[in-house]
Image (spheres, rainbow, N blue to C red):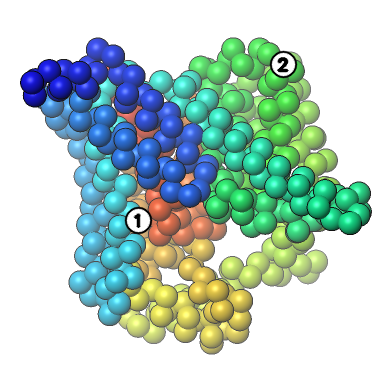
Amino acid sequence: MKKGIYNFFRIEGNRSYFELFLYLFVASLPMGYSLDGIFLAGLVLSWCFVSTWERKIQNLKNNKLSLGLLFVMFVIFLAGILYSEQPKVALGRVERSLTLIVLPLLVFSLDKAFFNFKRIYLSLGLGLCITMLVSWAFIFIDILSKPWPLRQAKYFFEWIYTHDNLLRPMDIHPGYFAFSLVIFAAGLIGLNELHGLRKRKGLYFLILFLLVLFLIETSSRFGFIAFFLVIIINIFRKKSKKAIWSMLFLITITFVIASQFNYLKTKFNKVIDENGSIKFERFHRWKSILDTFSESNQWIFGVGNGDVYEVYQQAYQEGGFSLALRDNYNAHNQYLELLIGCGVIGLFIYITIIVNFIKETRLKNQALIFFLLVILFSLSESFLVRSKGVLIFAFFYVMFISKLNQNND
């Protein structure tokens, strides 16, 4: 009886259960409401019944360095509980970082044939599309609910319908959505597996237009910069003049659309003033945080993940950052976040993880885009302290290594 039940769920020959939860999980990455956690649970369960344990162990051995580095990163987060004066806060961060272990075990243990790049990207695109349509639907309904809808519609290009307000219905931070959107857009433009979609010019450019429009609406400065870099990289990669002209046309369209959004222009204007001085508020916050942290003289191990907010609160109070103090902001910088919480050791491991990604993937194909995104967003977001950020980082990190590392053939 038990053997019959096991054989029913075992899908070594037919991976439909595993693939179903994999694509649902990827589609849920640009969504909120903990949908990703629900589908991840199904993915873990179905993983138990695919392949053989011997094969899984062998695959894990082939990726032992990458797996080991992510495990060390998790252990460093875990160790932060021991010397934090607020262990509950530290424990919360450890719980959110569990997927640094779970996802590598799932992906690295299976043959690369289990992961179809085309379907993974299309699933991500589907999730993005659903989120975009729902967000725009709420905006449309809000405009129609006003006494003067035509007058209200002009605010589509201003703060009232952008940034946090844009994605509030789907409960996701605009920075993480922008991260996912740029990954998909880069694949749509340059992934070999999506060549068939690019041949359908009308649909292809319509999708790109909608992606650009929504990306700009998120008001993510680093998302905008990352997308611009994607286009530049593809201009150098494309061999035909027609493809290059298409990329140049896309750049033009992007800047034309961006020029209509006052909130995005305002955010960029806050970076550097007319005299060349840095106005970027986060830069001054980082400096204040670093000055406060240096007084603790805990450079090696940091203050502990549970006590980082005490450092931030002191820095914000002394630096006069009232909004950051009121809303209890994190560092908005992954490098600084790790230095404060885990010391030089934690920062070194993170940089080693990034260097390992370069070594394992040779930054081939879309791995280069992901690498640039990680570097850029590490400057603007503390994404490893949020479950959504850890999920997106861990999944694509191990996915690219699994697909591009020659040891996994």
- Residue 201, label in figure: 2
Q: Determine the image quadrant of residue 275.
A: bottom right
| Residue with the most extreme front position | 1
Q: Is residue 31 above or below residue 360?
A: below
Residue plotted at (27% across, 73% down): 87
Residue plotted at (32% across, 29% down): 402
Q: Amino acid at mark 1?
A: Arg
| Residue with the most extreme bottom position | 318
Residue 241 at least partly seen: no
Depth check, front residue: 401 or 111: 111
Q: Where's residue 13, x and y in %?
A: 24, 12
Q: Where's residue 408, x and y in %?
A: 27, 23
Residue plotted at (22% across, 22% down): 9
- Number of numbered callouts drawn: 2
- Where does the C terminus fall, quadrant-wise? top left
- Residue 96, label in figure: 1
Q: Amino acid at mark 2?
A: Lys
Q: Where's residue 55, x and y in %?
A: 15, 23
Q: CA distance from mark 1 to mark 2?
A: 41 Å
- Where does the N terminus fall, quadrant-wise? top left
Q: Is residue 102 above or below residue 300?
A: above
Q: Determine the image quadrant of residue 83.
A: bottom left
Residue plotted at (76% across, 58% down): 160
Q: Is residue 6 above or below residue 165?
A: above
Q: Where's residue 6, x and y in %?
A: 14, 22
Between marks 1 and 2 in the image, the one whose residue lies nearer the viewer:
1
